[in-house]
Amino acid sequence: MKILIVEDEPKTGAYLRQGLAEAGFIVDLSADGIDGMHLALTEAYDLLILDVMLPRLDGWQLLRAVRQAGNEVPVLFLTARDRVEDRVKGLETGADDYLVKPFAFAELLARVRTLLRRGKTKELDVLRAADVELDILRRRATRGGKKIDLTTKEFVLLELFMRRQQEVLPRSLIASLVWDMNFDSDTNVIEVAVRRLRAKLDDNFPRKLIRTVRGMGYVFEAGDGE
Amino acid sequence: MTRRFSITLRLTLLFGATSVIVLLALGYLITETVEHHFEEQDLDILSGKIELAEHALSGITSRAELDALPQQLKNALVGHYGLSMTVLGPRGQTLFTTPNASFTPALLTLTSSATERVSTDLVVWKNGGHMHRGLAAVIPIAFMESSPVTVAVATDISHHVELLGTFSATLWWAMGLAALLSAVLGWLATRFGLLPLRDIARISRETSIDRLNDRIQLDTLPIELKETATAFNDMLARLEDSFRRLTDFASDIAHELRTPISNLMTQTHVTLAQARTIEDYREVLFSNVEELDRLARMVSDMLFLAKADHGLIMPQRETVDLARELTELIEFYGIAAHERDVTLQLEGAGIVMGDRSMLRRAIGNLLSNAIRYSQPGGVTRVVLSKTGDGDITAVVENTGADIAPEQLPRIFDRFYRADPSRHASSEGAGLGLAITQSIIRAHDGKIQATSANSITRFTITFSHAVN
């Protein structure tokens, strides 16, 4: 998976590159709009991450140029300006998603993965990870063949973890995807919810599947054991 | 071209003009009355004399009596200064005349054609610097075969005219002085009356961000200016309040940012001061991330509030089923409520027009607060209802310790925490209620808080006009 980052703030750019590279992506970084546009038009990328304020050519113009060239690559905008007009403009110009600075890197990573996955993977009806099996249609969860009793939201939460294995899911993303809470709500609630899910899922098993990544969120690791 | 005269000038001119008009009318009236009075007086005297002469003439039956007429008339006229008389015979011969009598021919010829025996037409003429007023009559005498005799009497009215002249002159002077005086008084009264306005002007002039505390003294103001001054004072009070909040907010921001930044700096500097194990570094980074998360959240909340202040929050207008949203919110916050052994209840229903995600945030903040301040085993209740006016209300109430009455008005202030010891705990920066209020206001709604008898209640009212 190849990603182009166009970001003129050197520190942000460097860390984004490092972070995404360490997450397994191939990353190109450009620090100004014109160079970025050339790269975007000449190389094949799976995703563009554009800062709005760029020297020489801003993010919107770059995006327009790319779309005019018939390139439908997904685009994620980073903006420091949290203005309603910006959002409208961004989505009208054909951006797929946006993040307002400052943002958590885990959040960015999660959004990047969502965009890259979009339309590509078939949603499975039965999810399996380690010895856990989740039957989406019948709303049944089992671990090691034994049924686990989950509330509706706990089921949705586990489904999210299983669909996004190995990904660190920030609390805000979980709140947004499971409870439709799209603002900085009580993160304490997420902690409680995850703790309860864990109690049902992990407590009676030596192998713990949901791990807390301090300061970032939670990750479901099914891996083939250490 | 319109010139703008000052109120003082206008009122001064008005006072002057009014007094001139009034005095002119009065002067005219007095002059006329006096003149008329003199005329009446003259007419009385003159017609009296004519009657006298008539009486004398009608009694004449012989030549001797006719010869005695002058003496008789002279006697009758004794003591009447300025009175003159002439009696003309049928052929115009003078039968009698007082010395210095000089009658205008107009008077004498007037009567020859008169049909009236005694006319009341007074004639005025001037002779040798004296003004005269005269009356004439034609009287038939039996003795002279009833041939008519003309009798004319006149009185010197110079002193009347003089008197009237002096009176007029005095009147003019008085009028001028009175006009001047009333103009001056008007000017003084206006100046004095407008002093409170100068007061207002002075306070306006001196008002600046450093001095918003001056107020116009209402008790000394005339009633007409009270309304203006009250409005002005209210405006000042609002400005002062807004400005105080703004400065408080600015210094609060600085204060709120300083603590986490100082933590981050100290921690990072200390860590870098010597080589440490990887675990130690990780620990510091974890701790930093927590601080930074809080900072980022605070900044985005402050941005939201700043946008709200500038009217940049534009809620979408969609149909929002509050009961449905609340069911979901309760599902979310129920997890926290359960942890704290707080029961959550929802009653009623209500549909409003608004921005779904903003309203969720606004009510979510209230729910989160309510759960946090409920005592263990307590109840947090949400009641949706429709008032008689068609307004939709959402009441979020919790059982638990009351908010002190003096704190109640401030709880919507930014960074305000009822309990200072809770400062910097995990519950956020104290912007939640301010954000809720901003959202509700952006929806043209109202939010109020009451706290008594161990129940704290927040009431949101969505105006029916919007829905």
Image (tube, coloured by chain):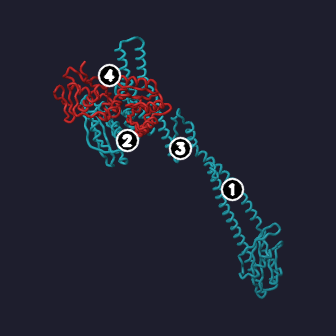
Q: Amino acid at mark 4?
A: Arg
Cβ atoms under marks 4 and 3 closer than 8 Å: no
Q: Amino acid at mark 1?
A: Met
Residue pointed to by mark 4: A214
**Distance CA(mark 4)–CA(mark 2):** 40 Å
Instruction: Say whether residue B402 is left or right of residue B302.
Output: left
Q: Residue furthest front?
A: A42
Which x, y percent locates residue B104? Answer: 80, 74
**Distance CA(mark 4)–CA(mark 3):** 68 Å
* Among the two numbered marks 3 and 2 on one chain, the one whose residue lies closer to the N terminus: 3
**Distance CA(mark 3)–CA(mark 2):** 36 Å
Label ID, residue B175: 1
**Distance CA(mark 2)–CA(mark 1):** 66 Å
The lab-note entry on whether marks 4 and 3 share a chain reads no
Q: Amino acid at mark 2?
A: Lys
Shown in red, the chain is: A
Q: Nearer the viewer, mark 2 or mark 1?
A: 2
* Among the two numbered marks 2 and 1 on one chain, the one whose residue lies closer to the N terminus: 1
The lab-note entry on whether marks 4 and 1 share a chain reads no
Q: Nearer the viewer, mark 3 or mark 1?
A: 3
**Considering the numbered disc 3 on the image, is that residue within a helix, a strand or a loop?**
loop
